[in-house]
Image (tube, rainbow, N blue to C red):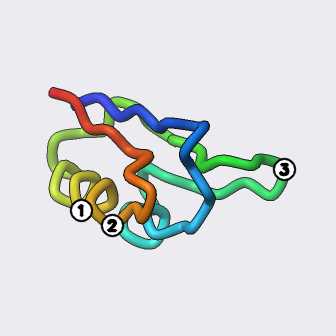
Amino acid sequence: MKIEVDVGACEMHGDCVMEAPEVFDLQDDSDVVTVLNDTPPEELRAKVESAARMCPVSAILVKD
């Protein structure tokens, strides 16, 4: 699994951070979400996919 964030679309709503804090973070000095691990372990797949679905601007893409 590989995660990509469309930085042009990200509006920092933070839903992804609430759903998968092991993978996503909001930095005070950044204007987009930070991906802490763009290739997270498989056991986090359900949380990552849920975070992607929750994104109100569909800025998160999960690839296999």
The amino acid type, in three-letter code, at marker 3 is: Asp
Mark carried by residue 50: 1
Quarter of the figure with the N terminus: top left
Find numbered disc 1 in the image and state the secondary structure of the residue it sits on: helix
Front position among marks 2 and 3? 2
Q: Which residue is mark 2?
A: 54
- Write the residue at 38% across / 45% down: 60
Front position among marks 1 and 2? 2
The amino acid type, in three-letter code, at marker 1 is: Ser
Q: Are marks 1 and 2 in contact (CB under 8 Å)?
A: yes
Closer to the N terminus: mark 2 or mark 3? Answer: 3
Mark carried by residue 29: 3
Residue 44: x and y in percent read: 23, 52
Residue 35: x and y in percent read: 51, 41
* Vertical side of 14 occupied by 42: above or below: above
Q: Give how far apart the Cα atoms at labels 2 and 3 are.
A: 23 Å
Along the line of sight, the residue nearer the viewer: 61 or 40: 61
The amino acid type, in three-letter code, at marker 2 is: Met
